[in-house]
Each structure stands twice: as C-alpha cells, then as structure tokens.
Image: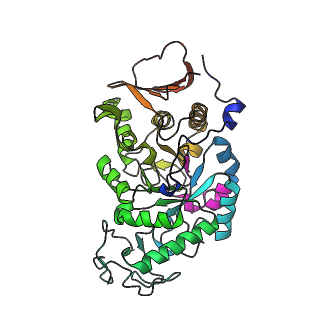
Amino acid sequence: MHLDVRVPWVAVISYPPPGPIDPKKCCGDGRDLVLQGFHWAAHARPNGKNWYRILRENAAHIQTAGFTWVWFPPPSDSLAPEGYMPRRWHVLDSAYGSETELREAIAALKPVRAMADLVLNHRVGSHTPGADFEAPSFPDNQAAVVRDDESGVGRGNPDTGERHPAGRDLDHTNPDVRAAIKEYLQRLQAAGFRGWRYDLAKGVHGRFVGEYNEATSPELSVGEYYDGDRQKVTNWIDTTGGRSAAFDFPTRYLLYDAIMTDDYSRLRVSNGGRMVAGGLLGYWPSRSVTFLDNHDTESRRDEEHHYQNNGTRHFPGRSVDMGYAYLLTHPGIPSVFWPHYFDWGEGTQQCIDRLIRVRRWAGIHSRSSLEIWEARKGLYVAAIDGRVATKLGTRDWWPGHGWHLAVDGERFAVWVRP
C-alpha cells in the first residue's frame, strides 16, 4: 500500500522550529532545505538565457517543491566566468547576469531565501596578476596580501590557512581586509542575500568566519571545508565558535562508497558507546549540510549539454535517487544539486519531490532522532523520529504492519507510520 504523500495538506503544512537555536550561531532553524542553484557551466547561458533569468523563471517551481534556500553562484565580477577568481567585489555584474537581474531573481524566489557564494580567500588585480585591487581597493594593497603568497607581492602576515595557487591570498589578520569584507557582505545583504556559503574554508582560519558571521548575522552559514576527515571538519566548525555549519564531505564519501559497493557497514559507528551515523552527521547534525554532488564533483557537461565524467567520484545513474532517499529522510541540513533536480529527468525530480514531502510530513529536522537498525553488506535500515523507515541495499526488508510504503526505487524504499 502506497501512502499518497502528494496530497495538498502535506504540501502546505508547516512546523515550528525543533527547539531553541541561538540565532547568533548562524545555522538556521533546523528545518532548512537547500537547493544549489547552479552548476559549473551555468554561466554559459544555456538556451541563450543568463542564469539569473533561469533562476527567476523557475522560482515558482522551487517554492512549490519546498526548498527554503537557494545557494547562488559567486555574485561579483570575476576573472573566471564561474566566479571563483573574484576581481571587483563591489561590482555585482557577472557572467550570470547584471546586478539588476540578480536582485530580481532573489526577489522572485521569496519566501525562499538566497545564499551567496563568498570567495574571500583570494582576489585578483583589476589589470594584472598582482595586487592592483579596485572596487574596493585596500589602504595598502600589498599589505592586504599574505607574505607567503607565491606571487611575491605580499607584505602582510603569513597565511592563516592552506595556501591557494590561484589569485592573491588575502591577509585576514589585517583589520583593513576584514573591514572591507564586512562592507562587502553588507552590500550583498542590501541586494537581498540572507545567508553565506564560504568557499575554500581551508584557506582561512575559522575564527575569521566566526567574526564575519558575528558582524552580519546570516540566517544560515556553511563552509566548504573540503575534507573526508570528520574530526578535521568538526575542528574547523569549532574554530568558528560554532557560528557556521559545514558541508558534510565525510558523509558524502561514506555514502558514495556504501552505494557503490552495496556495503553499508561504515554508515554506522560507535560514539561513546552509542551507535550513530558515520560522518559529521552522526556527531554534530545541526552543523552538517549533507549533499551528493556539487559544482566541483559533478560530471561536467560539454557544449552540447551532455554530461561527461570530470574525473571525480560523482554519483551515477539511479544511485542519485538512492542517495537522496538517505539524505532527505535523515537529520542534518540536506542540499539538492540543481542538475539532479532539473536535468536528470522526470523520474528523479518526482522522487526528490516525494522525499521532500515525506520529510515535511514527518517533521524531520536537523536534530531528529536516528536509530540505525541494520548496517551491513547488502542492507541499511534506519528509523527517523519513529515515523519514517529508510532501507537501502540489495537485500529484502520490510518494517512490518502499521507502516505504509511512501517512496521506492532501485535498491531503496521509504515507509511512514502515522
């Protein structure tokens, strides 16, 4: 028996936050659901339209689906069209569209909120590879660059994070740099942004992310600490003072390996004698932003918009549906990738839609209870808040009487219990 989770009352039901969350911590209300609103080639004007127009035209669909956030690509003028080589922070015309079109897209999406992709680790000069920064410049452009930058132009302090070969690494210990960044973030807020995604979080000490969030109070902040080591990601969150969530790369890698090998044993680990999910999800779920793929891990599209493997371990085929069955029924803050939702076909989109409706119907939030019943070769089974049961793997399993099948597909099923 299938439970019809498409009924209207499920689509409009709302829930209070799952408990007090300090707004200064910048980690949402626990019921956030993020759509990464772009992919690597989004700047290339697919179908002859700039990307902000595409976002605006899809606003009603995004709202109806139940997303609460859209993560926008880097909004500033950039040497590279993707936006990750920022040149002039204060110029919000980019390869994705004009500042006016950016503001129109943000406004069209409301009440879905907009998250800006912040590239603060490095910048490029306006005319040279050096430190000729403009819009804004710094009181001393060379002092704004770390002294160990490979360009040799920097006169600042040593880098507080990992060095990055592209662009000039900025010295965040310099109060002029921090003041300029805070002014930039305030400009983005004036344009309509309400959350931050910090690019290349390894490049800057987390205390500065905490300071920027303290100054601007984003409603949701997430750092791209690109590492599969759960402890390292946790340590980075700690350095922000707990004022930012992080993308859960550890869970992403564990889930990828589990689905590819049909062995789910590493999705359950012991933490102080209690069995929890592997990855950041099992240790700090309110700071875990879970995802399958993003613009860095995706299979890239060629000029004819066919997907090509870019050498990373991206989720292939129907494994995407299976992966979202895990993410959208589990604690944490799930993020859905634009191509998965809009480009992978009607079947995948409908699967994601139904899983989102199950999540909303059951009131699953970032700190929901998770009881993992099975985690072994061929079978993973978990109960979430006692109302949802999720099964992955090739082995058969059934939760018993009183449960109703809500969503199923290749190697996965989700049941609900009223």
- In this picture, is 405 found above or below 166? above
Between 261 and 217, the one lying in front of the other is 217
Q: Where is residue 285 in the image (x, y as percent from the top left)?
A: 43, 43
Left or right: 166 as drawn, with respect to 18: left
48 inside magenta stretch: yes
- Using the rendered image of the protein, determine whether residue 77 is visible from the camera's viewpoint: no
Identify the residue at horizontal 28%, vertical 32% (top origin).
273
Give the quarter of the figure containing the C terminus: top right
65 inside magenta stretch: no
Identify the residue at horizontal 41%, vertical 78% (top origin).
175
Q: Position of residue 412 (x, y in %)?
A: 47, 27
Q: How many labels does the image show?
A: 0
Identify the residue at horizontal 64%, vertical 70% (top origin).
99
Between 43 and 375, the one lying in front of the other is 375
Q: Position of residue 322 (x, y in %)?
A: 47, 33
- In this picture, is 44 found above or below 273? below
Between 310 and 286, the one lying in front of the other is 286
Left or right: 156 as drawn, with respect to 4: left
Left or right: 388 as drawn, with respect to 257: right
Q: What stretch is highlighted in magenta?
A: 32-56
Identify the residue at horizontal 30%, vertical 72% (top origin).
159
Give the quarter of the figure containing the N terminus: top right
- In this picture, is 310 found above or below 146? above
